[in-house]
Amino acid sequence: MGFIRGFGQFWYDLIVGDDWKIAVAVTVTLALGTAALLVFGPPSAVLTPVLGACLMAAFAIALRIDMRDR
């Protein structure tokens, strides 16, 4: 049981780390990218830059939320 708990804590710390908002943003962006691939077929030249822009925007929003409290 200790191995399973340690394994879960390792993956939680690796994926979530210090900021859960960034982990959620990456997960949502990857889900949107997967949905776009399923709807539109093979990746187009536009999909990669759009997903990259979504990740950067999500990071900027998470940073803005964290800096707002200070």
Image: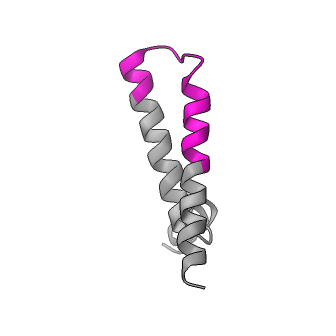
Residue furthest left as drawn: 39
Q: Is residue 13 visible?
A: yes
- Residue 40 highlighted magenta (yes or no): yes
| Location of residue 25 with respect to 50 vertically, above or below | below
For the residue pair 60 and 41, the one nearer the viewer reads as 60
Q: Residue at x 54, y 53 (%)?
A: 58
Q: Residue sitting at 55 percent across and 16 percent down?
A: 44
Marker count (numbered): 0
In the rendering, at what x and y percent does residue 32 appear? 42, 37
User: Please, which residue is most extreme toward the bottom here?
Assistant: 70
Residue 3 point in image, percent of width and height: 56, 69
Q: Quadrant of residue 10?
A: bottom right
Q: Overall secondary structure of the magenta stretch?
A: helix
User: Residue 53 at what x, y percent from top left?
Assistant: 59, 40
Q: Is-magenta flag for residue 50?
A: yes
Residue 67 on image: x %, y %:
60, 76
What segment is highlighted magenta in the picture?
A: 36-56
Residue at left offset 58%, top offset 46%: 55
**Residue at coordinates 62% horizontally, 48% vertically from top-left?**
56
Q: Quadrant of the C terminus?
A: bottom right
The residue nearer to you, when weighing 37 against 53, is: 53
Q: How is the image coloured?
A: one colour
Q: Choose top left, top right, bottom left or bottom right for residue 22.
A: bottom right
Can residue 7 be seen? no
Q: Relative to 60, does residue 42 appear above or below in the rendering?
A: above
Q: Is residue 51 above or below residue 3?
A: above
